[in-house]
Image: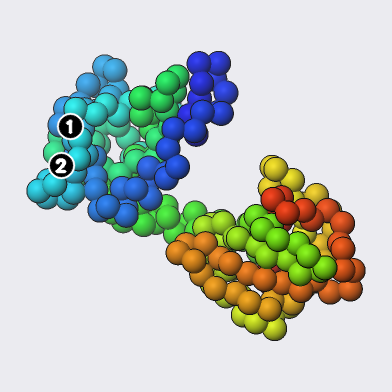
């Protein structure tokens, strides 16, 4: 998501986040020039040895909120050097062509440490709130879900006959009702998405769930 001209985060410009794209393609932002006054970097997006170059002449902006990391510790703008391969977490502005850095990683250990910390936060959030997914079908107490990619650790752990909890959710993904127990009757991975069929216990027509709506699921304790 990028901000529109009014500063609202409503404009979808790309479906894959930048860090996953860079990691997945093993690419970096190589620093070609540094403007200390404007606090910007001119970069080339390429693989590590630059044998493959995707784009030249990109501009990375920084501001007062930008954080820099080196050796897993806080760093500063002045630590960035020409030729250095960077990984970043950025956001756009206006029509989305700008790259304004939230996080700048000067080396791999800093990125790996940050990722590890973020994964731990994500795992705790999933354990507390459940994994989100779409309700594909709801018939006579049986419900089919497509679990979002972010629920991977939950989706991969689901097995037939396992007891889970499920709760309807609103468009904001927040739980909008009471959780009910269900039994997994089928579970598989389809690419990065989880496909699961559940038999909801007790009430054959639980309130709050609807085909096309959202739900959250987690393994019963």
Residue 106 percent coordinates (x, y): 27, 44
Instruction: Identify residue for label 1.
Output: 56
Task: Find out whether the residues at labels 1 and 2 contact each other: C-beta distance under 8 Å.
Answer: yes
Look at the numbered disc 1 and give the secondary structure of its residue: strand
Q: Which residue is drawn at 60% across and 60% down?
A: 146
The answer to whether residue 164 of the structure is visible from this angle is no
38 and 125: which one is in front?
A: 125
Side (left or right) of 60 relative to 14: left
Name the one closer to the observer, 122 or 24: 24
User: How would you rate the neighbour count of disc 2 (Cα within 10 Å): few for under 14, some for 14-19, many for 20 or more?
Assistant: some
Q: Residue 194 carries which label?
A: none
109 relative to 187, above or below: above
For residue 53, which numbered disc appears in the image?
Answer: 2
**In x, y percent, where is residue 214?**
70, 52
Distance, label 1 to label 2, CA atoms, is 7 Å
Q: Residue at x 69, y 76 (%)?
A: 184
Q: Residue at the right extreme?
A: 203
Look at the picture and state if 60 lies above or below 191.
above
Q: Residue at x 32, y 54 (%)?
A: 24
Which of the 4 quarters of the picture holds residue 131?
A: bottom right
In depth, the one of 42 and 67 nearer the eye is 42
């Amino acid at each position: 998501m990028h901000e529109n001209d009014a500063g609202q985060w409503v404009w979808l410009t790309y479906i894959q986040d930048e860090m996953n794209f860079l990691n997945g393609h093993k690419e970096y932002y190589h620093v070609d020039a540094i403007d200390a006054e404007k606090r910007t970097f001119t970069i080339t997006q390429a693989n590590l040895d630059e044998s493959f170059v995707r784009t030249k002449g990109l501009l990375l902006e920084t501001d007062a909120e930008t954080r820099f990391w080196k050796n897993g510790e806080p760093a500063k703008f002045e630590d960035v050097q020409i030729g250095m391969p960077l990984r970043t977490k950025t956001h756009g502005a206006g029509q989305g062509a700008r790259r304004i850095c939230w996080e700048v990683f000067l080396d791999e250990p800093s990125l790996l440490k940050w990722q590890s910390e973020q994964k731990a936060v994500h795992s705790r959030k999933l354990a507390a709130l459940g994994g989100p997914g779409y309700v594909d079908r709801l018939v006579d107490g049986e419900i089919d879900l497509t679990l979002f990619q972010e629920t991977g650790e939950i989706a991969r752990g689901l097995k037939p006959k396992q007891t889970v909890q499920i709760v309807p959710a609103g468009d904001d993904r927040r739980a909008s009702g009471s959780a009910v127990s269900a039994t997994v009757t089928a579970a598989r991975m389809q690419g990065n998405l989880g496909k699961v069929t559940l038999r909801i216990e007790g009430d054959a027509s639980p309130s709050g769930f609807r085909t096309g709506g959202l739900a959250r699921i987690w393994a019963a304790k």
